[in-house]
Amino acid sequence: MSVTALFDLKAETHFCQFQQVPSDGCRRNNGWRLSQFTGGRHCDERQVGFLTFGFLVLSVLSSAQSNCPQGFVFVGSLSGTGSQTQEFNKKVELKLPPGATLDESFQQSTVRATNAKGKANLRPQDIPKGILITPYGSSDSDKIWSVSEPTIKKENNEASSSRYIFGMHLFCMAKGHTFSQNTGGCEVSVEVCYKPTSEN
């Protein structure tokens, strides 16, 4: 649903206020429910709930898209979690949107591929052209994360509109301490954006 449609729907609900009412099917534990200010009729709580959900979705999408620089499109996130006893160590993939094309004139110039000093084995030139990644992970000093081996391929599909698949190897571990059993798990994530060609 478009932003305009959501605002139109909001306008139809008019102004609402909380007022105390006798106990009925709409009564809340604290004795208050949402009622319509104009005309004495009750607001459609389902409609208000839908509006709330719609604005939350738009907020999440807007936040995700804002993580990509202007001219780039947000694809999604690669992520993994490990426990104190089990590290995360595997290849993770996601698909670019149907019809997406990559502007190969763009090459990422810098990247932070790990929080372990001197142990990164990913160079910016290893990232496929047209792709922009932002890796991050657990910030605790006793947790290590890293990302490596970025790949781009076309899905195995005979259709002319087959999609790109981007993948990376993700790793994280929580170093155990004999004096502590509460270090918790580890996390590693990569936000992925792509730069479309001008005709896309």
Image (tube, rainbow, N blue to C red):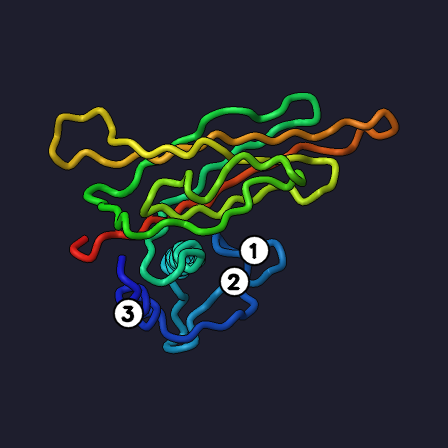
Residue 88: x and y in percent read 57, 26
Q: Is residue 18 visible?
A: yes
Tell me if mark 3 has few (under 14), some (14-19) or many (20+) residues whose alpha carbon lies within 10 angstroms of its own: few
In the rendering, at what x and y percent does residue 38 appear?
A: 39, 78
Most foreground residue, 36 or 10: 10
Distance of mark 3 from mark 2, alpha carbons? 24 Å
Q: Is residue 28 left or right of residue 45?
A: right
**Residue located 63% across and 58% down the image:** 30
Disc 1: which residue: 28
The crowding category of the residue bearing disc 2, from other C-alpha atoms within 10 Å (few below 14, some 14 to 19, many at least 20), is some
- Marks 1 and 3, how far apart at CA: 28 Å
Pointer 1: residues within 10 angstroms few (<14), some, or many (20+)? Answer: few
Q: Are marks 1 and 2 in contact (CB under 8 Å)?
A: yes
Instruction: Check disc 1 and give the amino acid type.
Output: Arg
Q: Residue farthest to the right?
A: 179
Three-letter code, disc 3: Asp
Mark with earlier residue (1, 2): 1
Comparing 82 with 169, the one in front is: 169
Task: List x then y, in percent, for residue 75.
Answer: 35, 46
Q: Residue at x 49, y 72 (%)?
A: 17
Labels 3, 2: front one: 3
Residue 117 versus residue 109 in the image, above or below: above
**Secondary structure under badge 2?**
strand
- Residue carrying label 3: 8
Are the residues tagged 3 and 2 within 8 Å (C-beta)?
no
The mark that comes first in sequence, 1 or 3, is: 3
Distance between mark 1 and mark 2 Cα atoms = 6 Å
The answer to whether residue 98 is above or below residue 2 is above
List the residue tagged with mark 2.
33
Residue type (three-letter) at the residue carrying disc 2 = Arg
Q: Is residue 45 visible?
A: no
Asked if residue 7 lies left or right of residue 81, the reply is: left
